[in-house]
Image (cartoon, coloured by chain):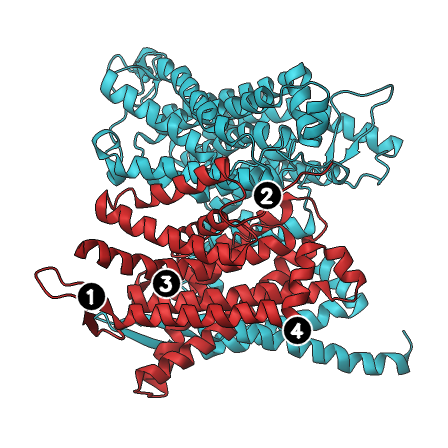
Chain colours: A red, B cyan
Amino acid sequence: MENFLQQLINGLTLGSIYGLIAIGYTMVFGIIGMVNFAHGDVFMVSAFIALLIFLAVTQVLGIASLPVAFVLVLLAAMVLTALWAWVIERVAYRPLRGSFRLAPLISAIGMSIFLANFVQVAQGPRNKPVPPMFTDVIALTDGPYKVVLSYKQILIMVVTAALLLGFWWLVQKTSLGRAQRACEQDRKMAALLGIDVDRTISLTFVIGAALAAVAGTLYMMYYGVVNFYDGFIPGVKAFTAAVLGGIGSLPGAVLGGLLIGLIEVFWSAYFSTDYKDVAAFSILAIVLIFMPSGILGRPEVEKV
Amino acid sequence: MDAPKSAPDLSALLRNAIFAGLIAAGLAFPILALRAEPDLNNHLELLNRWPLMLWAFGIVATGHLLAQVPWIGSALRWGLWACGALIAIWMLVSIASGDLPMAGRIVLFVLLGSAALLAVGLSAPVNADGALHARQTTVRASVAKVAGPVGVVALIAFPLVMLWMLGPGGSLKWINNYGVQILIYVMLGWGLNIVVGLAGLLDLGYVAFYAVGAYAYALLSTTAGLSFWICLPLAGLLAALWGIILGFPVLRLRGDYLAIVTLAFGEIIRLVLINWTDVTNGNAGLSSIPRITFFGLPFTASDNGFAATFGLEFSPIHRNIFLFYLILALALITNFVTLRLRRLPIGRAWEALREDEIACRSLGINTTNTKLTAFALGAMFGGFAGSFFAVRQGFVNPDSFTFLESATILAVVVLGGMGSQIGVALAAVVMIGGTEILRELDLLKAIFGPNFDPAQYRMLIFGFAMVGMMIWKPRGIVSSREPSIFLKTRKSVSASLVREGHG
């Protein structure tokens, strides 16, 4: 029971991170029908940006208070990563709008390879050990097996929940969100009604990247190590989460992220750590084959 | 273009350029300008490299400014082309001058030059209505007719010419690193071309079948002691079987989803290879795989070896030359089978499927069987290439079968112009040869200092080239398709008019 509770906490923490990344996949897929393969690497870039800013804030500016530093890092990472995503969309995807269907996907794969190797060249191939942060824990149970909830995990869940609320408000209540949902339903009609479709698509990328940056910051803090190839596997898992929840559906992405996080953690705890990635990939394949519209997605109707 | 009009333009141009430069500087700010380096106690220290940020600003702003001025824009484009060509020639000279005599250099330049001309000739744009100018058609037809045989003869001559000119020691690099390496990718490209180019099914996990072939040979030869010539067809069959097993469930999926599921399968196979240590020996891989024999004669210095039997002086180059001819033969078989299949009903069904799946189904084509055969055949050739890879290396481990490898093969197919055999071969030469050349560019070291390691930039440039190619020429090098069946007159179809099926 204690083990179960502990794994539940760990799973929800990991799932929050996957959920934040998954939103970027699902929003981009919803609006332009493209699998943004480079999104995982944008997440990895954001983790590096967060690490560098953190070092700059603590070592150069000399800010000793960890919460203040964390907020600064989070904001800077969101802004700078959003800038990356904006440029990537401008350079690699926008010229291909209206090209044949596989062109953006191939361009995104190229961009993914480019980003990973760019970070490798710029920051070196070795693991970066992140200085430990928020190391305190709260013991939830007494006894031989202590169930602990660390400050990090609380922080991750709180930040994720707060951001999701803000994001939900953005999509549901603001004119930007309305434009975004309109473009998702019918881009041509939205353009006819005076919505700047290109700008809306850019903003979709920017929002997705900002959420990925939050995930990247939290990931760096939680695992305490970052590397240039850290984008691929979490990226695919987050994509799995988006598919599992129903691609195009925002609550689905979060739900899928939590499920994938829980499945991965419980699988590692009760079966084997070696095959945890196999489990995630198998879920991806099984869901796509037997339930392509996911848990909360709308079934797709093929029109001739 | 008169003076009063250009004055406000200039300030706007400047503003735009500075804006672009600032964005570049913003991108460069943490990732390039700062570097976190662990010290001896494993604490991260921050290193400053602020000049890089200024460089990013300067280069992007200047480039943006120059590209916006109309005549400079076009001049810049041509200048870039000229520079690119010059640099390419310079690189080749700098590599070649080390060990290649003059005659060899000329042969190399003629080969590369004709390849480039061929690429330019074949990539000439086709009119939107699909009709070519009469002369263009005849030129293209004759080029295509001549290119194949000339290429094959040149390839057959290649190792012998290299051996004759450079001797056993000097030619090893050319035959092995360039010849065999490129031909493996030509074969893989042609194999994947059946799936992606002909049937229009985007497969991101093709390397799985390559892995199945390699491990099939490695395991069969080390445990059952079977020879390469028995293992080769077995490996192909096994890979084809896996193609069917993996293909069966995914065939209902549409384009992007199919791509992702194949990616998932590719990764699952790699992860199983890593974790199933009892059979595959995990990350350490399988070593001491039996090497290739000349139909039973080993390439060793012993008395019953290849060299002794034919009265030659023993040299390791014999094995490499044999491997070269072996992979050449395998690749040509792939090409031949593909070309013949395209004329059979099944090949026509593949192409029809690529164009429109729903129309196919309406016309009574069994789409499941059509897709499965494409998957199985593509996988089979991947399996052949895999067992060749294993016998060439004598060692396999899961690191050779990463997603990046799938992406490379896919890039070869896409850059070659999906569906075009000669385009795929050219793309393999350019991409694999190009990355091999980058490995040994001492020239760049002279420019950027002795710490500069060009091999690091290989994949960076590779990714960049993939994006650039999609933007500049999304239809690949050979962007027109010769229809394999036609009514009355043969018209080239611009590939931009061809739509991928919903595979």
Relative placement, left or right, of A155 versus B167 is left
B428 is higher (above) or lower (below) than B370 = below
Disc 1 marks which amino acid? Answer: Val
Question: In the image, which disc is placed on residue A148?
Answer: 1
Residue at point 46%, 36% (across, down) = B174
Relative placement, left or right, of B355 versus A130 is right
Answer yes or no: are tags 2 and 4 on the same subunit: no
Residue at point 66%, 44% (across, down) = A101
Answer yes or no: are tags 2 and 3 on the same subunit: yes
Q: Nearer the viewer, mark 4 or mark 1?
A: 1
Disc 4 marks which amino acid? Answer: Thr
Secondary structure state at the residue bearing disc 1: strand
B460 is higher (above) or lower (below) than A134 = above
Q: Quadrant of the N terminus of chain B?
A: bottom right
Q: Position of residue A221 (x, y in %)?
A: 32, 69
Secondary structure state at the residue bearing disc 3: loop
The residue nearer to you, when weighing A277 against B432, is: A277
Of all chains, the one bearing label 1 is A
Give the alpha-carbon distance from disc 2 to disc 4, as whole Å.
49 Å
Q: Nearer the viewer, mark 1 or mark 2?
A: 2
Give the alpha-carbon distance from disc 4 to disc 1, as whole Å.
56 Å
> Mark 2 — residue?
A299
Q: Around disc 1, counting alpha carbons within 10 Å, would you say few (fewer than 14), some (14 to 19), or many (20 or more)?
A: some
A230 is higher (above) or lower (below) than B45 = above
Of all chains, the one bearing label 3 is A
Q: Around disc 3, counting alpha carbons within 10 Å, would you say few (fewer than 14), some (14 to 19), or many (20 or more)?
A: some
First-in-chain label (1 vs 2): 1
Give the alpha-carbon distance from disc 3 to disc 4, as whole Å.
28 Å
